[in-house]
Image (cartoon, rainbow, N blue to C red):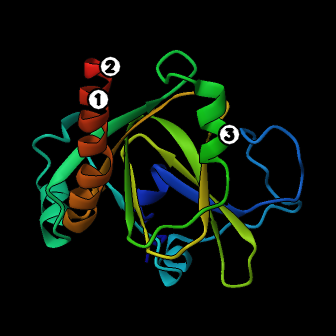
Amino acid sequence: MGAPEKDPREEVLQAWYMDDSDEDQRLPHHKEPKEFVSLDQLAELGVLSWRLDADNYETDEEFKKIRESRGYSYMDFCEVSPEKLPNYEEKIKSFFEEHLHTDEEIRYAVAGSGYFDVRDRNDKWIRVWVKKGGMIILPAGIYHRFTLDSDNYIKFKYDLPPFIRKEYLKTFVEKEVGDRAVDAAA
């Protein structure tokens, strides 16, 4: 009998308990000794994960099935780096502030890598390193935050559930259009 087959997700997703250091948030922040968290343990917290074909995300059948099964129809990109993201310093600080959502959040790294930190049931931080090809879904109500790793670059696809997308459009897009109309008249 050979060694157990390695989970292919582990090539693009790794997780561990974080130390309490205030050093640069882009560092790994492993505890000493290192305390890794399995992807199955993450799933017990509701954090789902996949390894997908990031080079062919437009035609990836598995990605399409996941989106359809979860009712996602809107997808966009977010590119985070000092060169690509306007107001980078301000935005990266806001991403790293602990928060939660009332709906699940999907993040699929199509380039680069970054850290999604989630709280376990005992309020301890688990750092989830998502690399190109890794996709996670954070459940509604889980406290989390995001930061880049020391490579300072990630491009990810994100999706909004249909109800949230409608609310987003109503709240932000229609408001912006309305504000522009007022500004144009002024």
Q: Quadrant of residue 17?
A: bottom right
| Amino acid on which disc 3 is placed | Lys
Q: Is residue 54 visible?
A: no
Mark 1 and mark 3: Cα distance apart in space: 32 Å
Amino acid carrying label 2: it is Ala
Residue placed under numbered mark 1 in the picture: 182
Give the residue type at disc 1.
Answer: Val
Residue matched to label 2? 186
Sequence-first tag of 1 and 3? 3
Contact? badges 1 and 2 (CB < 8 Å): yes
Mark drawn on residue 131? none
Q: Is residue 45 visible?
A: yes
Q: Give the percent coordinates (x, y) of residue 165.
A: 24, 57
Q: How many residues crowd mark 1 within 10 Å: few (<14), some (14–19), many (20+)? A: few
Q: Residue at x 50, y 22 (%)?
A: 86
> Disc 1 versus disc 2: distance between alpha carbons?
6 Å
- Image quadrant containing the C terminus: top left
In the picture, the disc for residue 93 is 3
Q: Foreground: 115 or 84? A: 84
Residue 132, percent across and down? 41, 40
Which residue does the image show at 66% across and 77% down from the upper left? 120
Give the percent coordinates (x, y) of residue 54. 28, 40
